[in-house]
Amino acid sequence: MSLFLRHLLWTTLCPGTVTILIPLFILPRNQVIDQMGWHQWGGIVLIGIGAGILLSCIYMFGKFGKGTLSPFDPARHLVIKGLYKYVRNPMYVGVMIILSGEAIFFWSRTFLIYAVIVFILFNVFIILYEEPYLKKEFGEQYDRYCKHVGRWLPGKPYAHHVTMKNTKEIDEDQ
């Protein structure tokens, strides 16, 4: 299956479920927006920012990682370009911004609680599965990356230099 179709499948299943399908079940059936207020516009802005972050990361996974966002079809190279230079989990950050935008758009405590639960689950998944997998897969490269780039909060851009031969790391010049 082509990389584009794999991305479409996993984007629909993973962030699509978290940001669209489950929120549709949370949303009260009688929810009506008569007039757009400040929080609807603010929510739309956040949803747009989060979607842009998410799509940018999906693109980076395909172009430089040669894989998808799914743990079943992961990136084959450590992606440390784009937003990944600033924060280790920008895709999750994008999803959290979308969920925050939905909570603000609907001015919903239930959506906010849902976003907090998702954040906790993301942390558990990252700490117990994703980070150990990446450490095993990419070894010293991932350790170096983790020492310089935060899990959730953006910081200074990661400046790396490839010094090892036959590494899976993608050089900045590629």
Image (cartoon, helix red, strand yellow):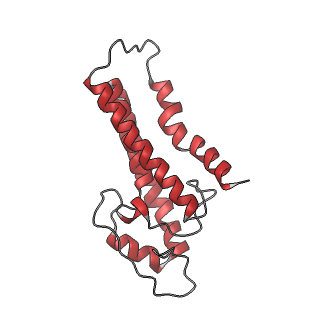
Q: Does residue 139 appear left or right of residue 47 in this picture?
A: right
**145 or 170, which lies in front?**
170
Image vertical order of residue 138 relative to residue 13, above or below? below
Residue found at the far left of this picture: 38
**161 or 95, which lies in front?**
161
Disc tally is 0
Residue 22: tell me if it is visible. yes
Residue 95: tell me if it is visible. no
Residue found at the far right of this picture: 1
Residue 100 percent across, percent down from the top left: 34, 37
Residue 71 percent across, percent down from the top left: 58, 56
Residue 91 percent across, percent down from the top left: 45, 52
Q: Quadrant of residue 148?
A: bottom left
Q: Quadrant of residue 34?
A: top left
Image vertical order of residue 154 relative to residue 101, above or below? below
Q: Residue at x 63, y 56 (%)?
A: 72
Residue 26 percent across, percent down from the top left: 45, 25
**114 or 142, which lies in front?**
142
Image vertical order of residue 96 relative to residue 159, above or below? above
Q: Does residue 27 appear left or right of residue 113 in this picture?
A: right
Residue found at the far front of this picture: 173
Q: Residue at x 56, y 69 (%)?
A: 77
